[in-house]
Image (tube, rainbow, N blue to C red):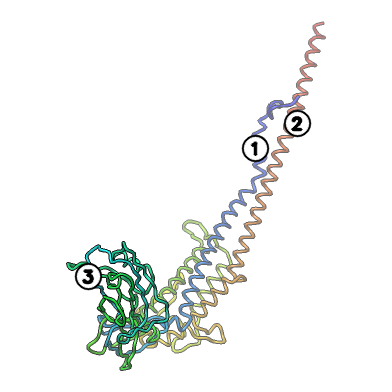
Amino acid sequence: MAISSPGIGTGLDVQSIVSQLVAIERKPLETLQTQATSLKTQLSTYGTIKSQFAALGDAAAKLSTTSGWGLFTASSSDNTSISVTAGTGATGGSFTMEVQQLARAQSTASTPVTTGSTVGTGTLSIEIGSWSGTAFTSNGKAAVPVSVSATDTLSSIATKINQAGAGVTATVLRDASGERLLMRSSETGETQAFRVQASGDAGVQALGYDPGGTGGATLTQAAQNALAKVNGVDIVSASNKLSDTLTGLNITLNQTTLAPVEINVVPDTEALKKQMQAFVDAYNTLNDTLSNAVKYDDATKTAGPLQGDSTTVGLQNALRAMMRSVSGTTPFSRLLDVGISTQQTGGKLTLDTKKFDEVMAKDLQGVQRLFTATNTDATLRGFGLKVKAFTDGMLATDGKITSRTEAIQKQQTRNTQEQDRINERADRAQTRLLAQFSALDTTVAQYNTLGSFVSQQLSLWSAG
C-alpha cells in the first residue's frame, strides 16, 4: 500500500528532517552570496573609478595642447558702438576701429489703402540682387512669384510673401490713413536688395517696387554695406557682424563712431584658472574614491570595497608619484612652482590661486610649457601630456582598469555557476531523500500490517 504523506508510516517529521538536510547541502551558498555581493560592489567601484579616470583625462587634455591655452578675452573701449568677443584662434594684441556706415537691409512701403480692403488679382515677382541707380542686377537666383487672389488683403498677401522664402519679410503698417505693405530684405548688404515686379490689377501693381519699370511702392531704406576701418585700413562688410575679419574675434558694429575705438585682446587668465581648477578637482575626486576604496576604518571596523586590491593601490601610488614628478621645462618644472601643492595627508591637490595668478602674469608661456611640453623621455613631458597618456593607458582595452574589471566579471561568472551547482545538488538531494523516506514509510507500514495480522492470529489460537 502506498503512503500518501511522508512520515505517516514511521511517525517521523520527514519534511523537517529533509529540510534540515537540504539546508546543510545549501550551506556553502552563504559564503558564495556574500562573495557575490562583494564582487558586485567591487565592480561598481571600478565603474566609478573608470569614469573618474576619464574625467581626469579630459581635464588634462585641455591643458596638454597650445590651443587649450589659447583662451583670450576681448574688450572694446566703446561697447555701444563696437562690441567684441574672442573665440578659437584669437591672439593677443590691440588695434583701433572706426565705423563710418552700418550695413542696412532694403525697405519699401506701399501707398496706403483702406484697412481690410482687397487689391484685386495679379502676381508679385520678387528678386534679390543689387541696384545701381534704376538698374537692377540679379544675384543669379530665379525670381519668386507670389500670387494675389481677389480675396487677398494686405495681411494675407504679407503672409504669402513670408511663406514664399523669397529673401524678404513683409508686414502691414496701420495708421489713420489706412494700411501699407512694408517689405524688408531678410539680410543686410548691397547685394541683398530686392525688386518687386507686379502684374495684374492696378491695386496689385501698386505694391511693386521697380524704379526701372512700374510699381507704386517707395524706397524707405536702401540696402548698403558696412564701412569701417581697422588700424586705418578700410574694410567692407555686407553684415554688421564681422566673424572672419580678424581671426578668432567676433565683432559687432552697433553704430557709427565719432572717434577711433580701441580693441584689446589679452589672455583670459580667469578661464585658464578655471581649467586648472577643473584639473585639480578631477584629480581630487579620483584620489578620494581610490582612498575610500582601499582604506580600513578602525572606528567602524569596516574595510573599503577594494581593501587589499593591489591594482587600486598601484593606481593611487602611480598618480601621486606623477603629481610629485618633474618635467623637463623651465623656468617651471614642478606643479608646486605654479601653485599646485600636494597635501601631506590624503594626497589631495590644492591650487594656490594667488600664486597661480602671479606666475601667469609673470610668464604665461612658461606655465603653458609645464603642461604642454613634448619630450622623447615620457617622464619629462608636460603634466597635461603625462596625465592624459597615463589615463588613456589605464582605460585602454589592455589597461589595468579594464583587465581588473574583466577579472572581477569572470569571478562573478564562476560564483554564479558554483551557486547553480550547489542549488542543483541540493534539489537532487531533496528529491532523493523524499523518495528514500517514502520507501521507508511503505516498508514500515507493511511490517506494521503484518504484525497486526500475526497478533490477531495468536489471539484466535489462544481463544480456541
253 is higher (above) or lower (below) than 396: below
Q: Tell me the distance, in whole angstroms, between the alpha carbons under discs 2 and 1.
A: 18 Å
Sequence-wise, the earlier of marks 1 and 3 is 1
- Which quadrant of the rendered structure holds the N terminus? top right
Q: Position of residue 446 (x, y in %)?
A: 77, 23
Say whether residue 35 is left or right of residue 1.
Answer: left
Q: Nearer the viewer, residue 307 or 36?
A: 36
Sequence-wise, the earlier of marks 3 and 2 is 3
- Which quadrant of the rendered structure holds the C terminus? top right
Q: Which residue is mark 3?
A: 112
Circle 1 sits in a helix, a strand or a loop, which is it?
helix
**Displayed quadrant of residue 134:** bottom left
Q: Which residue is mark 1?
A: 19
Q: Nearer the viewer, residue 265 or 287?
A: 265
Q: Residues within 10 Å of mark 2 (few under 14, many from 20)?
A: some
Sequence-wise, the earlier of marks 2 and 1 is 1
**Which residue appears at 48% of the width and 88% of the height?**
329
Q: Residues within 10 Å of mark 1 (few under 14, many from 20)?
A: some
Q: Position of residue 23 (x, y in %)?
A: 64, 42
Discs 3, 2 touching: Cβ within 8 Å: no
Q: Which residue is mark 2?
A: 439
Q: Position of residue 63 (x, y in %)?
A: 46, 79
Circle 2 sits in a helix, a strand or a loop, which is it?
helix
Say whether residue 47 is left or right of residue 77.
Answer: right
Q: Nearer the viewer, residue 208 or 191?
A: 208
Q: Amino acid at mark 1?
A: Ser
